[in-house]
Amino acid sequence: MANNCFEVCSLASGSKGNSLFVGYNDQGILVDAGLSGVEIQRRLSARGISPERLTAIIITHEHSDHIRGAGVLNRRFNIPVYITPKTFQACPSLGTMTGVCFFEGGRAFDIGRVRVTPFSISHDATDPVGLTLEIQGQKIGVATDLGVATNLVKNHLKNSSLLYLESNHDLEMLLNGPYPWHLKQRIKSRTGHLSNTDTRQLVSELRTDRLKHVILAHLSEENNCPKKAADEVATGLNASGITLHVARPDQPGELIRLEAS
């Protein structure tokens, strides 16, 4: 653990489970907890992170691949869960929890010294949100389940130091793949998921001198592959010195450190 340093690590990303660790000094936040509690602990441990360091879990929406372990971790380690009221009502599987903290999209709140700003996104969930997390000149933007990057989304994500963005599918693979037509239509709709091409366009608009890392998340195992996603999105970065990462579903990514200014 480095002092005065944001630490970011994708623990899992994909249709089988999503969880992102964001740390600052002794503080640790999980954005979503879509694996079992035991598996989240295992992946934290693989990166030298103790679950006792966790001070919050933020839930972005109610789909099972984002909430699976949240209730267990809340009860096991007494970790507060931050969630919108509508999403909470849509999550009976979380079970009985203590320390539930409600927030609303568009209203910033603090977790320790980290300022969290949730914003509405376009996805087929009850009250889905993206997030930015900021402290001492560093900003992390998170948007992993959305069918379209609206101007609202872009305004919140701009001037980020690190972006954790969905790059769900290659459109050709999706259209020619095995999914039934209604599911293909859902995925490529405005309430579905971003394609590699969509994400390439988004990062090209968000590229600034402040941006140091882009992590591609929520890749479909059936309709995408890491090389296709990285090659496509890299063209939007235009060889600008930004480091491009691809989050894996089966293992945690590297621990990325951002020095506070």
Image: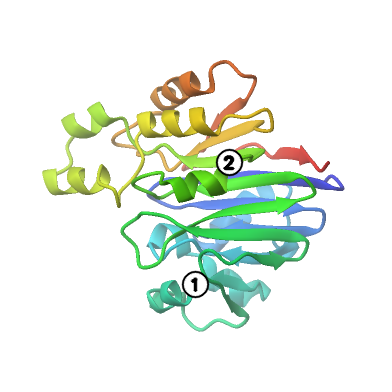
Image: 178 above or below 107: above
SS of the residue under disc 1 = loop
- Return the residue nearer the eye: 252 or 126: 126
**Residue at (62%, 64%) from the top-left corner?**
108
Q: Which quarter of the rendered picture does the C terminus lie within? A: top right
Label at residue 158: 2
Q: Nearer the viewer, residue 78 or 156?
A: 156
Residue 229 is left or right of residue 190, and the answer is: right
Q: Residue farthest to the right?
A: 3
**Counting residues from the N terminus, which is met first, the one under dot 2 or under dot 1?**
1
Tell me which residue sits at (43%, 43%) in the image: 218
The quadrant in which residue 162 appears is top right
Rendered location of residue 139, percent (x, y):
68, 46
Percent from the top left, x then y, of residue 210? 69, 33
Q: For this rendering, which residue is in front, 61 or 38?
A: 61
Q: Would you say the residues marked 2 and 1 are in contact, meaning their CB atoms lie under 8 Å apart?
A: no
**In percent of the image, x 58 and y 67: which residue is there?**
107
| Viewer-side residue, 234 vs 14 | 234
Residue found at the very far left of the displayed protein: 181
How has the structure been colored for display?
A: rainbow
Q: Is residue 11 at least partly visible in the picture? A: no
Mark 2 burial class by Cα count in 10 Å: few <14, some 14-19, many 20+: many
Judge whether 70 appears above or below 247 on screen.
below
- Image location of residue 260, percent across then percent down: 81, 43
Tell me the residue at 64%/46% (across/down). Answer: 140
Q: Could you say where residue 165 lies in the image, as x and y percent from the top left?
A: 49, 41
Q: CA distance from mark 2 to mark 1?
A: 24 Å
Q: Left or right: 76 with respect to 167?
A: right
Give the residue at mark 1.
Answer: 84
Q: Amino acid at mark 2?
A: Lys
| Residue 54 versus residue 246 in the image, above or below | below
